[in-house]
């Protein structure tokens, strides 16, 4: 546990008094009323800007000129900024095997290409912030094949744009195999993909598997196409909170053939929105087989799906058989009957049909929530382990000396960033009403990852607090100190788990100490948000007990870590589908739930 390891001497004494870190040390001395040593894990997050750079960038902000110096600002302040793309490879006309390229601009690449094959293998692999643009790629090509194998795998924040990809192409194919596998935050956009194409086939196999908290949008995908074939196989399987939007997909197309096989299986809370999918199409065949099978919850919306289509065939087999029920909405589905047929076979529960075509629709082994059948499937131990990592949640009784328990992966997977000095952060816009200014400063294009993460973080910060919650987003260490002391007073200590040793292994609990004598107390917990600079979502958590514990190796009994854990005693307002109840059993308000403080998260409490 790092509560305050190291004092203000040594290197701190030699700190330039005009740097952000030196100011933070003085601010701590003024605001915190105890003799505990200063927490190095918090001081290390102070802005690395030197005194000269601080003055220079502050001046640029006052002149509204920071955007034109963004790369220098991001590098000096240790921020998360996406690189500007290199010049387009438009004139690179030969067939290629792309391996080792990074942050490339393929605008107009392959335009009017006749035949040939481009292979992207192990491209942008193991990168923190890969940004690639495939704008107008293979446009108006004939018989040209694109193969994306192991593309952007194991990335962190992945931003890829396929805008007007293969528009007007004839024949050929695009194959995405193991695309964006095991990515942390994928943001993948297919805008007007294969629009007006003729006989071109696309296959998404093992696309975005094992990903975490991302977003994929298919806008006007295959619109006005003829004889297009699209296969989504193992798309997004075993991913966590993935959102996919299909807007205008296959609209007014002819003889489209789309297969969603094993789509979203084993996902946690997938969100899929099909808007105007297949609207006005002719002779389309759409098949959803094993779609969202054994997922946890989930929410799909089919608005105007296959509306005004001609002789369309849509089949849902084994759709939505989640082990915790989700919600599906079918609005104006199949309206404007022109011989289309829709079949539901072994379809899940909790579904709303509004303005649904009554003719040509068949239901076989359809599970209706009102039929009296169980709304929740039995959950096997293997599925629980897949969705809730062992040790992520535990009962208070496990925090006893001599107990052996699994520890989850507590490593920080966020991009490394630093706080901004308050003298700078206070001058930057920070609200959804000023998002256009923020986008201009941080070079965030429309629908880009940067725009998404800015909007998501701002929305979370502006969300109304939950019952009994006090919350604030802080972009400087000084703001964090102010919030913690406003809730808890000035005699406070901040704690975090000392290191990441023991992650994903069994651990042995050593000596345990309850903060505030183990009594029910109040704390302020702070969790990172994905934003250009280091931003924390801090909130007061009443009715908790906070513990620190030695963590030992079960075999050698040697101390390997010192952990901080928090136990929430009142879970009555938590969702019944919360992962804690999935892992531990029971439900809201019936049990307490404990978890470790992960790397770079922290909790504040009154000092002992």
Image (tube, helix red, strand yellow):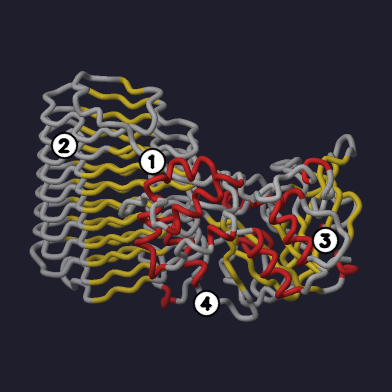
Q: Earlier in the sequence, mark 3 or mark 1?
A: 1
Q: Is residue 375 above or below residue 597?
A: below
Q: Is residue 211 left or right of residue 37?
A: left
Q: Secondary structure at mark 3?
A: strand
Q: Earlier in the sequence, mark 2 or mark 4?
A: 2
Q: Quadrant of the C terminus?
A: bottom right
- Quadrant for residue 228, please give it: top left
**Residue 200 - label:** 2
Closest to the observer, 181 or 298: 181
Q: How many marks?
A: 4
Q: Secondary structure at mark 4?
A: loop
**Residue 207 - label:** 1
Single out the mark in the foreground, 4 or 3: 4
Residue found at x 50% / y 48%: 56
**How would you rate the neighbour count of disc 1 (Cα within 10 Å): few for under 14, some for 14-19, many for 20 or more?**
many
Percent of width and height locating residue 577: 56, 66
- According to the picture, the residue beneath numbered tag 3 turns out to be 547
- According to the picture, the residue beneath numbered tag 4 turns out to be 464
Q: Earlier in the sequence, mark 4 or mark 1?
A: 1
Single out the mark in the foreground, 2 or 4: 4
Query: In whole angstroms, how far apart are the C-alphas of marks 4 and 3?
Result: 29 Å
**How would you rate the neighbour count of disc 2 (Cα within 10 Å): few for under 14, some for 14-19, many for 20 or more?**
many
């Amino acid at each position: 546990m790092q509560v305050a390891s190291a004092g203000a001497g040594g290197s701190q004494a030699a700190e330039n008094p005009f740097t952000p870190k030196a100011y933070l040390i003085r601010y701590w001395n003024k605001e915190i009323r105890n003799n505990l040593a200063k927490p190095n894990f918090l001081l290390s997050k102070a802005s690395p800007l030197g005194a000269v750079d601080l003055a220079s960038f502050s001046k640029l902000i006052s002149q509204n000129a920071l955007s034109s110096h963004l790369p220098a600002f991001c590098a000096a302040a240790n921020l998360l900024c996406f690189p500007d793309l290199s010049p387009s490879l438009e004139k690179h006309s030969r067939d290629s095997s792309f391996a080792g390229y990074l942050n490339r601009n393929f605008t107009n690449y392959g335009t009017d290409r006749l035949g040939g094959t481009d292979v992207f293998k192990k491209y942008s692999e193991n990168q923190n912030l890969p940004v690639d643009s495939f704008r107008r790629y293979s446009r108006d090509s004939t018989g040209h094949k694109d193969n994306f194998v192991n593309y952007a795998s194991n990335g962190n924040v992945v931003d890829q744009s396929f805008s007007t990809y293969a528009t007007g192409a004839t024949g050929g194919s695009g194959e995405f195999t193991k695309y964006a596998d095991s990515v942390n935050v994928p943001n993948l956009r297919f805008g007007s993909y294969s629009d007006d194409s003729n006989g071109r086939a696309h296959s998404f196999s093992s696309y975005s598997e094992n990903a975490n908290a991302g977003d994929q949008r298919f806008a006007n995908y295959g619109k006005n196409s003829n004889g297009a074939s699209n296969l989504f196989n193992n798309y997004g399987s075993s991913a966590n909170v993935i959102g996919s939007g299909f807007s205008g997909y296959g609209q007014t197309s002819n003889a489209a053939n789309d297969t969603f096989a094993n789509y979203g299986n084993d996902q946690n809370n997938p969100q899929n929105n099909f808007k105007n999918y297949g609207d006005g199409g002719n002779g389309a065949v759409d098949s959803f087989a094993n779609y969202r099978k054994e997922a946890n919850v989930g929410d799909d919306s089919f608005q105007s799906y296959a509306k005004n289509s001609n002789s369309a065939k849509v089949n849902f087999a084994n759709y939505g058989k989640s082990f915790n029920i989700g919600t599906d909405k079918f609005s104006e589905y199949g309206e404007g009957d022109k011989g289309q047929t829709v079949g539901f076979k072994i379809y899940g529960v909790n579904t709303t049909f509004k303005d649904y075509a009554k003719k040509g629709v068949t239901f076989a082994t359809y599970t209706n929530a009102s039929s009296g059948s169980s709304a929740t499937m039995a959950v096997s131990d293997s599925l629980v382990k897949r969705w809730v990592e062992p040790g992520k949640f535990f009962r208070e009784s496990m925090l006893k000396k001599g107990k052996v328990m699994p520890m989850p992966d507590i490593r920080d997977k966020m991009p490394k960033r630093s706080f901004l000095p308050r003298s700078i952060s206070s001058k930057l816009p920070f609200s959804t009403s000023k998002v256009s200014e923020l986008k201009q400063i941080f070079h965030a294009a429309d629908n880009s990852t940067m725009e998404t993460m800015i909007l998501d973080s701002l929305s979370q910060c502006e969300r109304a607090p939950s019952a009994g919650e006090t919350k604030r987003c802080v972009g400087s260490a000084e703001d964090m100190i102010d919030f913690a002391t406003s809730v808890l007073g000035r005699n406070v200590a901040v704690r975090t788990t000392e290191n990441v040793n023991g992650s994903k292994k069994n651990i042995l609990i050593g000596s345990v100490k309850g903060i505030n004598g183990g009594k029910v107390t109040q704390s302020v917990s702070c969790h990172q948000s994905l934003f250009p600079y280091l931003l924390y979502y801090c909130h007061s958590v009443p009715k908790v007990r906070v513990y620190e514990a030695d963590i030992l190796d079960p075999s050698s009994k040697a101390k390997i870590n010192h952990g901080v854990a928090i136990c929430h005693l009142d879970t009555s307002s938590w969702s019944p589908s919360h992962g804690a109840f999935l892992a531990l059993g029971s439900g809201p308000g019936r049990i307490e739930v404990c978890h470790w403080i992960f790397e770079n998260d922290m909790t504040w409490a009154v000092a002992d």
